């Protein structure tokens, strides 16, 4: 089974939520940090989240910046968390947003598709051109790995560059998507999707249906729901019958325990509660 078919199956079984492990010491309770190294505290918090959410989410996304900021201790927690997910047969995205070409890109691929930091998917930035993406193709051919490439992001500054018109009159992000679509179609799996996915934010209502229609065979990583408060209907419209995409929620899930008096004793349970609520909030659009 290819990795994209496995993700498709996980969504069918467990729902489309992607739990973002953007873990910071700032919101780990003091008693969980007491007498522990930074790496141990970060990992123990992640383990608590994972152990209580693995059956109600499809995949986990680790934003590497949160771990790099703590140096070697943080990267040990990153490694240990990915290893824990792998040992439990759970899927992972390394949110690394790499962008380089030639041998440098090949080294990034080696770093994040094998060894200590191995993940099932990574995020890439396409703005150096297609040769910054093609270096990962050898991993896509096997069906064992996948990528999510920035297309239409959910941040306010996305409009600075992504919507600039190209010579053919199309917005830049559509031009990028069309080129990636060609690469993806070389490797379509049984589920009807290929290993080249797109990062598509749900904060621009007027675009979501066109993007979904244009890139039918591409999986979406959908940020913006939760802290950025994207409309749940936009999120729903970026999927195909509640599949074909994963909806990332990070801090809203990780910090949900802070909303309850007994939260520090039930971090995982309240993370699970929020993950389920996220799925339900988006799924209600099915009957609209």
Image: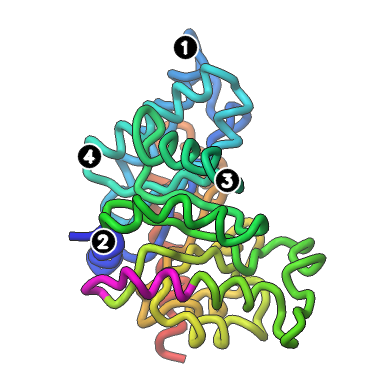
Residue 45 drawn at (x, y percent):
44, 30
The image position of residue 121, as x and y in percent, is 40, 51
Badge 4 marks a residue whose secondary structure is loop
Of label 2 and label 4, which has the lower sequence position? 2
- Disc 4 marks which residue? 88
| Figure quadrant of the N terminus | bottom left
Disc 3 + disc 1, Cβ < 8 Å: no
Q: Marks 1 and 4, Cα distance to the nearest angstrom?
A: 24 Å
Q: Say if the magenta span includes residue 223.
A: no
Residue where numbered disc 2 is placed: 10
Q: Earlier in the sequence, mark 2 or mark 3?
A: 2
Q: Residues within 10 Å of mark 2 (few under 14, many from 20)?
A: many
Q: Point out the tag, 3 or 1, that comes first from the N-terminus.
A: 1
Q: Are marks 2 and 3 in contact (CB under 8 Å)?
A: no
In the image, 284: left or right of 206?
left
- Which residue is under mark 3? 98
């Amino acid at each position: 089974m290819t990795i994209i078919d496995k993700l498709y199956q996980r969504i069918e079984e467990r729902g489309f939520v992607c739990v973002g492990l953007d873990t910071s010491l700032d919101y780990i309770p003091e008693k969980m940090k007491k007498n522990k190294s930074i790496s141990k505290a970060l990992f123990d918090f992640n383990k608590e989240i994972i152990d209580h959410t693995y059956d109600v989410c499809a995949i986990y996304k680790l934003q590497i910046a949160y771990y790099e900021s703590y140096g070697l201790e943080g990267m040990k927690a990153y490694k240990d968390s990915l290893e824990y997910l792998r040992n439990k047969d759970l899927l992972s995205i390394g949110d690394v947003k790499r962008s380089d070409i030639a041998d440098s890109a090949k080294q990034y691929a080696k770093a994040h598709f094998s060894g200590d930091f191995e993940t099932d998917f990574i995020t890439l930035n396409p703005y150096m051109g297609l040769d910054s993406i093609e270096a990962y193709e050898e991993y896509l051919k096997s069906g064992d790995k996948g990528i999510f490439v920035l297309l239409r992001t959910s941040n306010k500054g996305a409009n600075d560059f992504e919507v600039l018109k190209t010579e053919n009159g199309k917005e830049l992000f559509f031009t990028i998507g069309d080129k990636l679509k060609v690469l993806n179609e070389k490797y379509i799996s049984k589920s009807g999707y290929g290993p080249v996915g797109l990062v598509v934010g749900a904060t621009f209502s007027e675009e979501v249906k066109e993007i979904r229609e244009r890139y039918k065979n591409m999986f979406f990583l959908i940020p913006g729901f939760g802290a950025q408060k994207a409309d749940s209907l936009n999120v729903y419209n970026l999927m195909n019958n509640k599949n074909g995409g994963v909806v990332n929620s990070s801090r809203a899930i990780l910090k949900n325990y802070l909303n309850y008096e007994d939260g520090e004793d039930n971090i995982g349970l309240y993370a699970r509660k929020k993950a389920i609520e996220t799925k339900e909030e988006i799924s209600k659009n099915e009957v609209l």
